């Protein structure tokens, strides 16, 4: 009998895919080696998949912490509506895969889970935001454990994340 497929979403740059704004990646060995031994990894890159290009202009989150705008740092192009629409469609596309967890890129204006800087009107940067895709995904899937690669450097967080992924998978098998 084959073992069940347990899938987790992963920011594509953490898998070594060259999808970042600078054309590079942020391959993470814990994700590509340890998690890949136990789970099927489903790559997602909101900015690349939206069509922002690689390489591309960097973007910042600006304005309201709970509903920030995604703005190009040089052109001032507002990507907010496009990203929010893409995120909702991507969440629907991912639903049939029954993801049991997600590892997102720390600090990303699309994937950052914790402490993403949001620039205020006065120029002050508040480290209290969440990336637009991360926010939409977590809102739509509150039962799915989500972490970033920095927090997963902690062995206790690793163990907790894997336990939550397995528990979710097991609860869905009933």
Image (cartoon, helix red, strand yellow):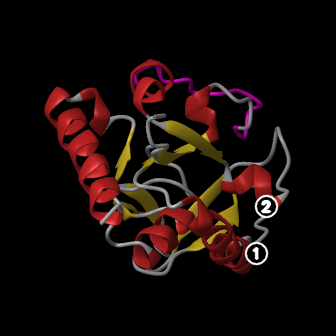
Which residue corresponds to the image point at 28% horizontal and 47% vertical from the top-left?
A: 166
Give the magenta-colored segment's residue range.
20-30
**Looking at the figure, which quarter contains the C terminus?**
bottom left
| Above or below: residue 57 compared with residue 140 | above
Check disc 2: other Cα within 10 Å, few if <14, some if 14-19, many if 20+.
some
Q: Which residue is mark 2?
A: 50
Residue 2: percent from left, percent from top: 48, 34
Image point 38% across, 44% down: which residue? Answer: 148
How far from the left and from the top, in percent, is residue 44? 64, 49
Query: Count of labels shown?
Result: 2
Q: Residue at x 59, y 29 (%)?
A: 15
The residue wearing badge 1 is: 82
Tell me where residue 7 appears, x and y as whole percent.
Answer: 50, 47
Q: Nearer the viewer, residue 46 or 24?
A: 46
Q: Are marks 2 and 1 in contact (CB under 8 Å)?
A: yes
Magenta stretch secondary structure, dominant: loop
**Any magenta on residue 25?**
yes
* Label 2 secondary element: helix
């Amino acid at each position: 009998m084959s073992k069940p497929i347990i899938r987790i979403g992963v920011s594509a740059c953490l898998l070594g895919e060259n999808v970042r704004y600078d054309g590079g990646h942020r391959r993470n060995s814990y994700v590509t080696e340890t998690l890949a031994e136990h789970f099927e990894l489903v790559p997602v890159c909101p900015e690349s998949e939206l069509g922002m290009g690689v390489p591309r202009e960097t973007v910042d989150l600006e304005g309201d912490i709970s509903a920030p705008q995604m703005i190009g740092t040089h052109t001032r192009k507002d990507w907010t509506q496009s990203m929010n629409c893409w995120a909702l469609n991507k969440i629907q596309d991912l639903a049939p895969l029954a993801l049991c967890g997600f590892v997102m890129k720390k600090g990303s204006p699309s994937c950052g889970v914790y402490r993403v800087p949001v620039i205020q009107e006065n120029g002050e940067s508040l480290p209290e935001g969440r990336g637009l895709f991360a926010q939409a995904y977590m809102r739509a899937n509150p039962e799915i454990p989500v972490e970033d690669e920095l927090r997963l450097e902690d062995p206790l967080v690793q163990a907790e994340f894997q336990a939550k992924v397995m528990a979710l998978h097991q609860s869905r098998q009933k």
